[in-house]
Amino acid sequence: MSASARTAVLSTSARPRHSRSVAAIAALLLGCAIALAAPALSTAQAEETPATSAPQTTADETATESTPAASTPTATEEPNPSATTGPAPAPQISQPKNGQFVGSNRTTVLGSKAASQEIQLLSPRGGDPLCIVNDTSTSWSCDNVYLQNGPNITLRVVVTGSPTLSAEISVAVLGAPTVLGGLTGSESNGWVRGTGHPQAVVTATLPNGDTCNSTADSSGAWACLFSGLGNGSLNVTASQTSSFSEPSSSNSSTPVAIVFDVTAPNAPVVTSPSAGAQVSVAGAQYTGTGETGATVTVFAGAYSVCSAPVIGGTWTCSAGGVAAGSYSVIAVQKDNAGNVGPGSTPASVSYVAESTPTPSGSASATPPVTPTPSPSASPSPDGAVAAPGPTAEPSPTPGPGTTAPDPQAAEPENEGAAASAFPGQWNDPTRFAAAIGPTGTGSPFPWLQAGLLALGALLLIAVPLRLLAGTISRSRGGRPLRALPSLAGRNRVREEYEVAPTVRLNRWLPGGAALLAAATFVMLSGPIVDQPAYLRLLVAVIIGLVLVNAVAILVPLWWSSRVLRLRGTITFLPRYLLLIAAAAIASRLFDIHPALLFGLLGSITLTAATDAVSPHGAHPAAAEPTTAQRGQLAAVRVGALAAFAVLAWSLGSLLPAASDFVTSLAAETGNTIVLAAIGSAVLILVPVGHTSGRRILSWSPLVWTGLTVVTYGILFAALSPMVDQVQSAGTGLTLWITAATFAAVCASAWAWQRFVTPAQR
C-alpha cells in the first residue's frame, strides 16, 4: 500500500474514535448537571403533577447506568402524613363504664389511645389534670385517682395539643365514711361517731356483725349507738348509702379500734364542805374522791357550781356565785367513755353572806379620823373576793361628803360576780338532767334494798291505810267524812233560768292550762333560778307529762275497747292538780332528790256497753261493768305506767351525758317521765276511796300486792340517793318507828271496830 493510501485509512479510522470520546465527555457532563438539578426538578414535578413523565434517557445507555443512586432522592423521601394516612383516633375510657357506680373515692381509670399520643385525664373539679400519660403504648392507666362524692362526676380525657380529640363519661361516686371513735374520744359507752356524705344513711358494723344506723346531718356528722356490748376493744367499720347510690352502698371504711366501756362510774364522794357546814356565797372550795380520769360536776341546789377532773382518785374545784340560803350539795361524775354515774349523797350546806364587817373594816367606817388608809381596811371582805379588780387597790381617804360605806357598795359587785360565774346559757345543766337511781353502781344491793323497803311500805303503810279507811267507812255506815265543796258549781238551780247559761270553751283550753300548771308545780319540786336553762326544763317537763298522760289514757282505752268490749271515757279530774302540787311541795320542803312526783290529770271511766242484745231481741241491753272489769282496767293502767317508767329509765341510761341543749333536754324529759310515771302509779295504788288501788284490791288482792311491791320497789330504787341521805343523817330509825306506830294504831282501830264493838252491843 502506498503511503498516501495508508495515511487516508488512518485518518478515516481516527475520526470515529475521536467522535466517541467527545460524546462520552459530553454525556458525563450532562449526567452531572442532571444529578445537581434533580432535587429541584423532582420538587417542582411533585408540586405540579402527581404523575411524572417518562424518565429522561440519553443516547448512550452506559452513561445513564453510571449515574449515582443519590441522584434520585425523592424515591426514598417519607411522604406527608396528611397526604398518605387518615385522621388520628381519639382516646377512649374503658373503665369505669359510663353511668357506673363507684363505691370509693380512690379508683383506677383505664383506656386506650394512639401510640404517639400524650393524653391528660382532667379533674372534675378543675385545676391540674389527675394524671398525664406519655408513652408509646396504645393503652393508658391512671391509678389511685381521687373522685369526690356526687351523682354525676364527669371524667374527661383529651390529647395534649388537640382538645378536640377527647372522650367523656359520667359516674356516680360515694366513698366510705370515716369512723372517729366514741362521743368524747377513743373510748365509748356504746356510741360511735364519724363523718360521711350529708344526708347519707351510715351503717357502722362490729366484727360479730352487729350494726347500728345513723343519718348524717347537713355537715356530714353522724353518730349511732350499739346496744348489748361488753367492755373491751373492738374494730368498727362503716359504710353509707345515699339517694343517688341506692340500692348500692359504699365500700367499708378502714377498721378503727374503739375501747368500749359501758359500766357507769360509782357515785363520787364530797368530803368538803361537809353536811351542816356554812360557806361564803363569795366563794368556796369543793373537794372529794372519784374515779381517776372522770370529770366531776358539783351542784348546789339548782346551781351548777364547778367541774374538775379526778386525778389520782381526788378532785378539787372552787367557785362562788351561789345565792344565800341552804342547798343540798351533790356531785356527779362522768368517765372518759361518757358514762354518767349517780349523784353523791346529798349534804345540806348553808351559804351565807358576810354582811358583818371585820375590825379593820370598822376602822374604815370613820374615814376623816384616819389620815392614811390601810390597804386591808379599805375594801370590804365581800368586795375583795367578788370583784378583786376595782377593790384590791386602796382608795384615798373619802371626804366628809362621802356617805356610802364599803360593805354596801360591794353588794352590786357581788351580784355581778354571781352573774358572771353563771352566765345563764341554754346549755347549762339542771338537777333534772342528773342520772337518777343506782344505775351503774354495779352492785345489786340498791335493788335488794329497794325491794325490802317496798315490802316495809306495803306492810306498814299501804295495808294499814286500807284497814283505817275500812274502819272509818264502817263506823259511818258508808257515808263519806265530809262532802267536798264544789269549786266552780252554780249557786242557783237551773230551773230559775228560762235558758240555762252555758259557757262553751274549747276542750283543749282547760287541758292545756292544767298541763302548764302541772308542769310549773313539777318544776317547783326543786330549786330554780332565773336562767334560760330552766325554760328548757319547763319544755322538758311538759313533754314528759304529755307522754305520761298519753300512756295512762290510751293504753286503758285500747284495753277497754279491744279486750273488755266496754266503752271507756276520759275524765278530767281537776283535784289531781292538788296531788301534783302536794307532791312537789313535799319534795321541796324535805329536799327529796330525785323528787317524788305525781303527773296524772285524768282517769278512764267505764260505761255500759250498748252492743249487747236483750234476750227478747227488742232493745239493746246495757252491760254494766263488773267489779272484775273495773279492777282489771285499773291494773292495766298501773302496769302501763310502771312499764313506761322502766322503759324511760332504760333508754335514759343509754343516752349520752347532758352536755348541750339536745342532750340536756333528752335527759330532763326522760327523768321527768320516770319520776312522774312511777310516782303516779304508786299514789293511785293507795287503796283508799275510789282510787285504782281500791278497785284492784276489790278484784284481786294478789294482783294488788304484786303491783304494790313492784311499783314501790322501782320508786325506792329511783329515790336511792334520798334513802342514803336519810340513813347518813341518822333519821332512818325514826322513820321506821313512826311507820310501825302508824301501822299499830290502824290495826288496833280495825281490831276494835271488828271484834270489840260488836261484842258490846
Image: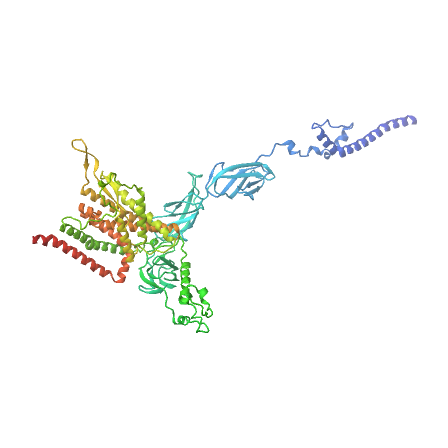
- Percent x, y of residue 310: 38, 60
Say which of 197 and 727 sits in front. Answer: 727
555 is higher (above) or lower (below) than 77 = below
- Which colour style is shown? rainbow
- Percent x, y of residue 175: 46, 43
Residue 752 image-quadrant placement: bottom left
Whether residue 658 is visible: no
In this rendering, position of residue 253 left or right of residue 747: right
Say which of 313 and 753 sits in front. Answer: 753
Say which of 408 and 278 sits in front. Answer: 408
Residue 435 image-quadrant placement: bottom left
- Percent x, y of residue 575: 25, 48
42 is higher (above) or lower (below) than 502 = above
Position of the N terminus by quadrant = top right
- Percent x, y of residue 745: 16, 57
1 is higher (above) or lower (below) than 697 = above
Whether residue 623 is visible: yes
Say which of 339 and 20 sits in front. Answer: 339
Count of number-bearing discs? 0
In this rendering, position of residue 266 left or right of residue 111: left
